[in-house]
Amino acid sequence: MATGAAHLSSSKLNLGLLRDFYRREFLECIDKCLGTKAIVWDDGLTGPFGLIAEYSLLKDHEVEKMFPLRTGSLPPSNVQNIVFLTRPRLELMEKIAQNLHHEETKGGYKKEFHLIFVPRKSLLCERKLKEKGVYGSFSTVEEFNMTLIPFDADLLSMEMNDAFKECYLENDFTSMYYAAQSLMTLQALYGTIQYIHGKGDCAKQVVDMMRRMRDEMGGREPQVLPQIDTLLILDRTVDLLTPLLYQLTYEGLIDEIFGINNTSIKLPAERLGPQPSQEGVESKKVILNSADTLFAELRDKNFNAVGSIVSKKAKLITAEFGERHAAKTIGEMKQFVSKLPHLQATRQSLATHTSIAELVKECTDADDFIDALRCQQEFINGLETDKVHPLVEECIAKSEKLSKVLRLICIQSICNDGLKPKVMDFYKREIIQTYGFEHIVTLNNLEKVGMLRPHGARTYQVIRKSLKLIVEEVNEQNPTDIAYVYSGYAPLSVRLAQYLARPGWRSITEVLNLLPGPKVEEVQQIPAALRKRRSSISSSQSSTGEQKLTLIFFLGGVTFAEIAALRFLAQQDDVGGELIVAATSIITSDRLLDSMGGDCCGTMEESPQ
Amino acid sequence: MATADWNPLGETYYRKCEIYSMEWAGLVDLSKFTVAAAAYGGPIALLKDENKLNRGATTNIKPVVSVYNAAGRLLSQIRWSSGRIMKMGWTIMEDLLFVQDDGVVLVYDMFLGFKRTFSMGQEAKDVKILDARIFTSFQGTGVAVMTTSFRIFLITNTESPRIIRLAEVPDLNAVPNCWDIVVMDRQVRALVGKGSELYIVDQGGQYQKQDPKTEKEEIGDYLDLAVSFNNKFVVLFTGKGHIWMGSSDLLNCFGEFETKTAAKPQQLAWCGNGAVVALWDRFLLVVGPQKYWIKFNFECPVYLLPEVDGLRIIGNEQHEFLQRVPPVTEQIFKIGSMEPGAMLYEANREYQKQHQKADEYLRMIKERLDVAVNQCIQAAGHEFEASKQKQLLRAASFGKCFLTDFRPESFVNMSQMLRVLNQVRHHTVGIPLTYTQLEHLSMPVLIDRLVLRKLFGLAILICQYLKIPDAEGQSRIMAHWACYKVQQKHVDEEQLARVISQKLLERPGVSFSEIASVALEHGRRQLAVKLLDYEPRASEQVPLLLKMGQLQPSLNKAIESGDTDLVYTVLLHLRDNQEPSQFYMMIHTMPIAFSLFIQYCRHQNLVLVEKMWEQEDNQAEIAYTKIVRSYGEDTMDIRTKILEESSHCFHRVGNIFAEKQVEEQIKLLKHQRKLEDEMGLSFVDMSLQQTLHKLTLEGAHMAADKLRKEFKVPDKRWWWMRAMALAESGDWAELEKFSKSKKPPIGMEAFVDVCMKHHNKQEALKYLSRVLPDHKVKALVKVGQLREAAEQAAENKNEDELIYVLGKVKVADKQLADNIRQKIEQLGSRR
């Protein structure tokens, strides 16, 4: 069993298997070059690989040095092999070429060079390297097909942040091909998935590609007992509103405020309380996954419920520490001591999350956050959507972050089924004059993907009402509906998943037709020998008492709030069954909008003044 | 009697049985041919031997090469048209190798179709070779040659020849009497007998003189040597008629024997691992380690071929097999054997005679009946005759009836294997495999060999019979069949395509691209195109389509596959091999190809992108691309020019808003440029708002105001900008003046805001009194006057505001908090 990944195996579908699979493949890949080696990492890969293979493992396989991929020259080292581990991106090829040119002028001990593409080789990249005259320097050019990285027991991410932009803006479906491949990998490990549902153009593409890939396998299908019953593939374009809204779960807020990168965040060290931290360390890395039981409990709660849970836990732990005074006999003492490591870990985690919650609260209590939230609530309720909103105007006038401004405008556009020309032109002109003319491209991009659009047919109200997206009474402490994750708004994407589970999509055909893209339904045949035996023929769902397992794949990204809502769904009895979530990446509104910027635009995170 | 053909050799027995009576009987006289047969029941190649014909030293007649199956059925025949053949032999893939005197090796298939050729190196070519050996290495089949300069060169794999030179034998200046190749521990060495000395030479340039331990003082020159099938043993024959056998490192001697003849045998070989055979004309001597021996006489010349478990003896009339009687067979059939298997065999015979003795025999072995059954099953495997196999299997089956928990797999397996073996041993197929050989060879390889012999039908029947999965069995065979079929030039292409697709379409795992590429190799383009259409794997299909010049289909297929890399492969091929206009027409109708090509161009050069959009006459995209491109230009004139073009494009599509924005940007750039000249500060690439901000910071209020008017900046934004900039520059006087210039559209609270942002409470307080009651609470909170804020909120009778203030109260200030709570209550009670 792989180390440090116990939390991956805790759900019905053991994702530890997938991790082990990648580990094996990766080691096989690097073992092909004999002798000591240094790995040169593409920055985008260090995070995902950190979740797959720890440094000590690499060390066992003669990896002596690790360098980040940078322009210019490689740091000196006396290893036999240099292994470049990179995504197939042209700009990275430039850097690799530079590295190699410098190495050649250095002379000295002759090294062997290897190149490993993750997840696939690319003709364009190889051509680039040839143009630069370095392709011949590589002894081997390999590919390591890692596409879906297990983040948690029920969460997989492809970590392709540009997937949304590539698919919907640039018409480049490479990432969909990877998605289809990753689904084939999953089926190879966990068996063929019998029922496939999907909505959206990309979902259809992926299902088509999967069918082709299955044909290509030519009968060599996985002989594994199917563990996943249903696959639901959703295009992000089906529900563009949800990711734009302010996430109000604990984990969602942490992601929006600090940015969770491959399950970990960096926090200012001085804010993490009196801990034995080294001098001069400015930021501290905190790992956020279900291995931390307190976090597992907090992550999906509405932030307003976090405080009370933390304080309850704090009391509990103080009481437990108090037990040592009550312990009289040696036996009792022994029992207490045996609990001590666990208690200390819990106390540590409690301290960490108290600090994080305080940091989050500072943000959520700020006036501008509350104002923006109020504005958002007005929009999703269909109020004030058809004219220029004073808050948006003020935000622009005060040159606040462009990502915030665009977020509100896009929400307004979607909730109003597009903006009236006068309003649209006003916003555009304001943005161009304030944030720069280059954003005429950004605005055009937003229009292309549909986040911003001219006024059109009225559908939002219909969808909102028939899918009950707005829930008036929300109990944030003990929720009864998924709407708690946005304090009153139920994410459309998750509603679709909910309706699919029960009573089925046939009941909402009209709404589905209003949403963009085709509906996909496919049944994959499972060899008779691998079919599950049902105890009774009449009822197909609940008779056996065995829980169904559904995989939901978000093309174009998923937010933590949506994941929280899905986890909440899985716990409800009426849905029945476990859920696994996979996505091209974990997104926030900021990350999504940032990717919409034109080539000539800088980041939207900074305000212009 | 089962033991009639058994010959004792010490404690073991050897038996020689006929496996075929040769079909070539009467037509072929082996004494006139050089013979090369392939192991594992492989085919036999004959080459008319000039020396054997005694026609004199040089004849210009080219020899004839014939290939027969092991039963003497002619498979193919050609007249040799290349150089002088020094050696002929088979590879493990059943390809026929001819080593020429110039070191060139020609590779032919079993049907004497030429496959390829390679050379054994420059030296071999220059000085010619004396002799060659073909051997089985750890990588495949190897070839070794000895040049006329007595150096040995070898390759270890005919599939990828890499020439290795062995060390030289010291002072070798005459042809050595004998030499051969020994493969041990992934090392290939040569054993060379030079006079009375024996050397091992290796790849690393080392040679070692060997002195095998012997019981005799002098054994004379080494005349001949042979290596066993598994490379573990060596036999040496010396000038004094002495036979020495031992391990191939020559350290251990297993036995020695005096033949009392000095004549070098025609062939020296191992029979399995237990005995050595030497052949003089028609006299065959079998020698065991303990000086025991057997002799056989033949009526005609024979050829010996070592197998893993025995020796094939090929003659003019017969094809025989000499082997040690397998131990299990010995246990059953040896006279007087009391082994359980023997008893069971007897019991079954009595049973068939309906004799009560059957019961007696069974009782004797009751305890060991399972052993007996297994012995009978195993022994059945070692029999060539179907009747004997049946007898033994019946015995096993009979014994099985009395066992309750006997697992039937071994019985079933053996029955199946025997059925397959009997089929392939049939003289029309001619593969005389023993059970042991089949175990070594494995079933998939046997099936491959049937396919090589074009016995597709039999191969498929075997696969069906053994229930081998389609992908590895039937489909693969069908694919081979199709490859063979497409080479048949006399059949109409249309018909072929139909026949092949009918048979193969529903088969999983058939590579149509492979079949198509064979068709293409044989110049059948149309057929290849048709076949390729059935290929499900785009990654295989597309490159071949490109190769065939099927451009449009290759692009279609690549796009269908969704594999971007494949699409790029096609796109770049198309672009490089076509006229631009043609290329454009092709991708014009394919949005995905078009978009991908745009992406590619974007990485290369934006001008290319514009050209593509121009082809599409997509003015909006051209305009946006131009805007992006303008940012990459250094000089202001070019930037302005590109932006002007962009504005024209917008004009053409009637996007008035965008056109206006571009024009304004051009105007702004001009202003910024002018400002830069006037003020010596940089402004270009700032937004209008940033420009105004900077101007205000610099105190250039007039310039700012001018821009404001020209660009019609809305009031609110102007006020915010100005207030923020003034506060930032600390120009509090100007700020105050500004606040009084007219009623601020952003409210007086904005002024409190900007002051507090720069931590100037003093200034903030100045504006506080002018804040309207509606906004006062927040403003008071901002300057930190919570008590006043609470009072104001109470005055406003606004509960929300009170709660808001309460939220800002520090935990320590309990008094204030209580105060506010009280106020909230009062408000609540009044309602």
Image (cartoon, rainbow, N blue to C red):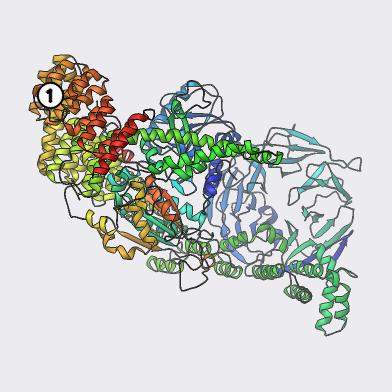
Q: Position of residue A197 (x, y in %)?
A: 37, 60
- Residue A37: where, in percent of width, then height? 55, 31
Compared across the picture, whether B695 is left or right of A166 comes to left
Q: Seen in the image, is A217 located left or right of residue B258? A: left
Q: Residue furthest bottom?
A: B354
Give the residue pinned by disc 1.
Answer: B670
In percent of the image, x 80 and y 63: which residue is there?
B326
Q: Which amino acid does label 1 sit on?
A: Lys
Residue A55 position by quadrant: top right
Which quarter of the figure has residue B680?
A: top left
A579 and B600: which one is in front? A579
Which one is nearer the viewer's eye here, A56 or A166?
A56
Of residues B442 and A34, the one nearer the viewer is: A34
Quick check: B602 above or below A65?
below
Question: Is residue A178 something that shows in the picture?
Answer: no
* Number of numbered discs visible in the structure rendering: 1
Image location of residue B319, percent across then percent down: 72, 65
Q: Residue at x 34, y 57 (%)?
A: A496
Quadrant in the picture for the N terminus of chain A? top right
The quarter of the rendered structure image containing the C terminus of chain A is: top left
Please state if B727 lies on the left or on the right of B257 as rendered. left
Q: Can residue A299 be seen in this view?
A: yes
The x and y percentages for residue A332 are 67, 41
Q: In this view, does A480 lie above or below B506?
A: above
Residue B670 figure quarter: top left
Please tell me which residue is depicted at 71% across the width and 63% down the height of the picture.
B435
Q: How crowded is mark 1: few (under 14 residues within 10 Å), some or many (20 or more)?
A: some
Return the residue nearer the eye: A420 or B66.
Answer: A420
Query: Secondary structure beneath disc 1?
Result: helix
Q: Which chain carries label 1?
A: B
Give the answer, above or below, for where A466 lies relative to A254. below
Up-down relation of residue B241 to residue B647 (above or below): below
